[in-house]
C-alpha cells in the first residue's frame, strides 16, 4: 500500500513523550489510547470536549482539565511502553461506540456512524474501500472485454485509475494537461493552498505522517498527487496532452466513441465505460462587465495566473473576494505599489490560527509513536470540520431573520461577527464594509489567521465596495462615477461551476445530447449516473459539492467505490450496459432539492456559485457525509436497466 504507516516504538525518554503530548488533541488522543490499551476508563466524561465550542482552542476544556487529560495519557502510554507495546484486542461495537462518543464530545451521535467510523479508521492501516476483487476472478476471460476510459488525471481521476488497476480492469486515463494534479496543477496563483485540513484532505489509504503544514500549499499538494500517481503505478496508463472533445454512445455495440485532440492530431478511442473526472471548478468565469475587452493593460484570471506579468510596484485591481482571491490578495498586496480590491459581497471568515502554520515535529511524533492516533485525529477532523458543523447551517422554517437561518446559525453568526469586530475594531470604516449580512453557510467561509485584516489595513490597499459599472482602457469605473486607473486587472471571479462537463459534447442513447438534456440545470443520480447515458459515470458531478468543509476526496472515494460496484455487476451478469431508471433519478433529485432548501446555501438570497441560472442548487450535497457514504456503498441493481 502506498504511504505505508508504521508506528515506531515509544522512546525510553519520558520527557520526549510529555513534550509531544502537549501538542495532542485530547478528543483524538484518549480514544487512541483507549483503543491501544483497552482501558476505557480513559474516556472520562469530564474530559469530553464541548461540541458547541469546537471551533475554540481546547473546545471548552479548561487548562486544568487539559493538563489532567495529558497526565492520564502519559501514564497510559508509559504502561503501554513498559508492558512491551502489547496492543489490546480490537474493541467490540459497544466499546467502539464509547470511543466515537468521546470524539464528538457533547454532540449526539447515532449508531449509524459506527461502520463508517470503522472504515475511516482503517485500523490497522487497511484500505477498506479497495475493490477486494479482481475482474478475471468474476468474469474469467470476459474481463478482457471490459475497457474503461477515465477523463482527467486530477484527484478523482487518479483515484479511479488506482481502483480500476486494483480490480484488474483495463483502463486508460485521458488528460488534457501534461501532468497529473488537475486543480492543483492548474491553479498556481500566489498563496494557493487547501482550506480543508490536509490530514483529512488526502486519500484515506494514502495518509502522510509528515505533512509540512496543516493546510498545504499548492506545490506540496501537487507533489502529493504526483507521488500518488507514481506509487499507484497508474502513470503508464495516462495519455497526457489528450483532450476529449466528445463522447458518443454506440447503442449497437455498447461502446463509447471518444474523439480526442492529441499532439499527433485528432483520434478516436473506444471504451465500454467512461468515467468523467473533469472536476467542477476549472473553467474560469469572467464577469460580464461592459468594456472588459477594452482594458489596455494585462489582465488574467486567478486560475490562469500569468507569471510573466510583473506586479511589483504596479497599480493592481482585483475583482472578487472569494476563496481564491482571499488567498492571493495578501501576497499581491506585499509587492504591488497599490492594490484596489473590488468587493461585491464580503465573505465570512472563520478563525483558523494554524492556517499558515507548520505542523510541529511533536505532532508528527504523535502520528508516528501512538498507535491509531493518526486515524483518530483524522476522524476528529472529519467531525469538527464537516459532520459536526452541519446542524449549524440547517434552516429552521420558523426563523424569520434574514441574517441567519436558525438559532444555532445565529450563534455561529455572532461568533463570526465577533471575530470580524475584533479584527477590524480599530478601523470602523473597514468593519462596516467587511461585515456580511447573510447567513453563515450561504457561501464558502474563508479561513483566516488575521491575514485578511492585516492586508486590508495596509497603506497600499483600498477596499472598494461601490459596484463596477464599466471596464475602460485605463481601469475600472464604479457606480459613483470614479474611474480607478490601474496597470493590471486580476479576476478572482470564480468558475462556471454549473456547466458540468463542458466544453465536452456528450451524446447518449437515442442521440440525446447531455447539455441539451440538462439545459443548464445538471442533475444526476447520486451525482454519478444520468438516464440515457449508459456506462457513463460522473465523479464530482451534480450535487456532490460540500459547503461546510468536508473533503471532496471523501466524496470521490465514495463515488469511485460505487462505480467499481457497478462495473462488478456488469461483469458478474455478463451485461453490456447499465442505464439509470428515470424514476429513480427523478425521485432522488426531488429529495436533493428538498434537502438543499433546508440548508443555508439553498435559501439565502445572496450571490454564490452554489446555485445555477434557475436558482437551483445543482452543486451541493445537502445531507451529511454519512448519508452519501451509505447511499454509495454498493449499487442497488434495481436502480438500473441492464442489457
Ligand atoms: P467564488 O467563490 O465564486 O468567488 C468569486 C468572487 O468574484 C466573489 O467574491 C464574487 O462576488 C466576485 N464576482 C464575481 N462576479 C463579479 C462581478 N461581476 N463583479 C464583482 N465581483 C464579482 O470563486 P473562487 O474564489 O475562485 O472560489 C470558488 C470555489 O473554489 C470555492 O468556493 C472553493 O470551493 C474552491 N476553492 C478552494 C480553495 C481552497 O481549498 N483553498 C481555494 C480557492 C477556491 P459575489 O460573492 O458577490 O458573487
Image (cartoon, grey):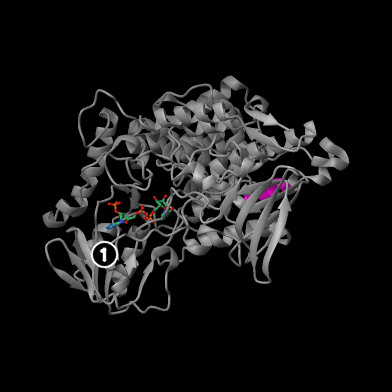
Quadrant location of the C terminus? Answer: top right
In the image as oriented, which residue stretches furthest toward the top? 94
Q: Nearer the viewer, residue 82 or 415?
A: 415
Q: Say which residue appears at 83% left-offset and 37% top-offset.
A: 139
Q: Is residue 492 visible?
A: yes
Is residue 370 toward the left or the right of residue 589 in the image? right
Provide the residue span drawn in magenta. Answer: 159-164
Q: Secondary structure at mark 1?
A: loop
Quadrant where ligand 1 appears: bottom left
Pick the front one: 589 or 304: 589
Front residue of this view, candidates 478 and 136: 478
Q: Is mark 1 within 8 Å of ligand 1?
A: no
Looking at the image, residue 531 lies above or below residue 399: below
Q: Is residue 163 magenta?
A: yes
Q: Residue at x 43, y 50 (%)?
A: 497
Which residue is denoted by mark 1 in the rendering? 290
Please indicate whether residue 221 sits to the left or right of residue 142 in the image: left
Image quadrant of residue 385? top left
Q: Residue at x 81, y 45 (%)?
A: 145
Amino acid at each position: 500500500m502506498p504511504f505505508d504507516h508504521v508506528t515506531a516504538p515509544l522512546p525510553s525518554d519520558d520527557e520526549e513523550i510529555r513534550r509531544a503530548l502537549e501538542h495532542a488533541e485530547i478528543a483524538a488522543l484518549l480514544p487512541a489510547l483507549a483503543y491501544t490499551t483497552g482501558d476505557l476508563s480513559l474516556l472520562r466524561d469530564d474530559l469530553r470536549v464541548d461540541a458547541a465550542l469546537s471551533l475554540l482552542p481546547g473546545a471548552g476544556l479548561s487548562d486544568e482539565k487539559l493538563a489532567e487529560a495529558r497526565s492520564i495519557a502519559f501514564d497510559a502510554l508509559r504502561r503501554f511502553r513498559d508492558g512491551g507495546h502489547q496492543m489490546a484486542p480490537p474493541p467490540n461495537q459497544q466499546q467502539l461506540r464509547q470511543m466515537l462518543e468521546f470524539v464528538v464530545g457533547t454532540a449526539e451521535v447515532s449508531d449509524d456512524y459506527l461502520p463508517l467510523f470503522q472504515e475511516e479508521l482503517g485500523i490497522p492501516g487497511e484500505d477498506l474501500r479497495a475493490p477486494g476483487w479482481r475482474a478475471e476472478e468474476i468474469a474469467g476471460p470476459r474481463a478482457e472485454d471490459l475497457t474503461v476510459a477515465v477523463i482527467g488525471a486530477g484527484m478523482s481521476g487518479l483515484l479511479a485509475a488506482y481502483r480500476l488497476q486494483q480490480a484488474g480492469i483495463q483502463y486508460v486515463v485521458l488528460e488534457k494537461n501534461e501532468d497529473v494534479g488537475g486543480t492543483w496543477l492548474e491553479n498556481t496563483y500566489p498563496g494557493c493552498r487547501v482550506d480543508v485540513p490536509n490530514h483529512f484532505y488526502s486519500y484515506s489509504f494514502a495518509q502522510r505522517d509528515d505533512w509540512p503544514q496543516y493546510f498545504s500549499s499548492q506545490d506540496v499538494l501537487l507533489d502529493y498527487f504526483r507521488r500518488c500517481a507514481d506509487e499507484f503505478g497508474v502513470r503508464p496508463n495516462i495519455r497526457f496532452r489528450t483532450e476529449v472533445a466528445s463522447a458518443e454512445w454506440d447503442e449497437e455495440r455498447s461502446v463509447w466513441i471518444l474523439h480526442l485532440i492529441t499532439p499527433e492530431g485528432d483520434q478516436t478511442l473506444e471504451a465500454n465505460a467512461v468515467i468523467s473526472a473533469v472536476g467542477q471548478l476549472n473553467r474560469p468565469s469572467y464577469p460580464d462587465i461592459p468594456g472588459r475587452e477594452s482594458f489596455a493593460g494585462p489582465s488574467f484570471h486567478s486560475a490562469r495566473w500569468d507569471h510573466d506579468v510583473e506586479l511589483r510596484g504596479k497599480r493592481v485591481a482585483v475583482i472578487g473576494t472569494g476563496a481564491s482571491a482571499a488567498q492571493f490578495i495578501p501576497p499581491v498586496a506585499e509587492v504591488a505599489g497599490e492594490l484596489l480590491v473590488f468587493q461585491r459581497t464580503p465573505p465570512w471568515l472563520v478563525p483558523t490560527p494554524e492556517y499558515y502554520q507548520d505542523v510541529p515535529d511533536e505532532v508528527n511524533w504523535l502520528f508516528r509513536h501512538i498507535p491509531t492516533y493518526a486515524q483518530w485525529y483524522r476522524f476528529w477532523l472529519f467531525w469538527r470540520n464537516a459532520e459536526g458543523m452541519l446542524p449549524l447551517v440547517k434552516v429552521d422554517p420558523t426563523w424569520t431573520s434574514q441574517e441567519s437561518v436558525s438559532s444555532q446559525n445565529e450563534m455561529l453568526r455572532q461568533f463570526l461577527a465577533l471575530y470580524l469586530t475584533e479584527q477590524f475594531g480599530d478601523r470602523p470604516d473597514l468593519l462596516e464594509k467587511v461585515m456580511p449580512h447573510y447567513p453563515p453557510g450561504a457561501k464558502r467561509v474563508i479561513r483566516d489567521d488575521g491575514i485578511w485584516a492585516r492586508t486590508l489595513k495596509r497603506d497600499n490597499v483600498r477596499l472598494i465596495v461601490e459596484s463596477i459599472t464599466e471596464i475602460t482602457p485605463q481601469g475600472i469605473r464604479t457606480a459613483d462615477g470614479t474611474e480607478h486607473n490601474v496597470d493590471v486587472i486580476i479576476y478572482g471571479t470564480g468558475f462556471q461551476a454549473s456547466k458540468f462537463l463542458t466544453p465536452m459534447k456528450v451524446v447518449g442513447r437515442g442521440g440525446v445530447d447531455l447539455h441539451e438534456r440538462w439545459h443548464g440545470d445538471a442533475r444526476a443520480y447520486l451525482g454519478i449516473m444520468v438516464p440515457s447515458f449508459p456506462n457513463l459515470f460522473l465523479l464530482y458531478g451534480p450535487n456532490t459539492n460540500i459547503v461546510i468543509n468536508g473533503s471532496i476526496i471523501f466524496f470521490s472515494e465514495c463515488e469511485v467505490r460505487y462505480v467499481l460496484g457497478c462495473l462488478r455487476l456488469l461483469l458478474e451478469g455478463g451485461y453490456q450496459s447499465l442505464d439509470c431508471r428515470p424514476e429513480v433519478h427523478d425521485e432522488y433529485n426531488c429529495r436533493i432539492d428538498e434537502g438543499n432548501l433546508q440548508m443555508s446555501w439553498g435559501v439565502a438570497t445572496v450571490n454564490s456559485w452554489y446555485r445555477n441560472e434557475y436558482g437551483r442548487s445543482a452543486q451541493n450535497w445537502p445531507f451529511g457525509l454519512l448519508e452519501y457514504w451509505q447511499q454509495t456503498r454498493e449499487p442497488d441493481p434495481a436502480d438500473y436497466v441492464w442489457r
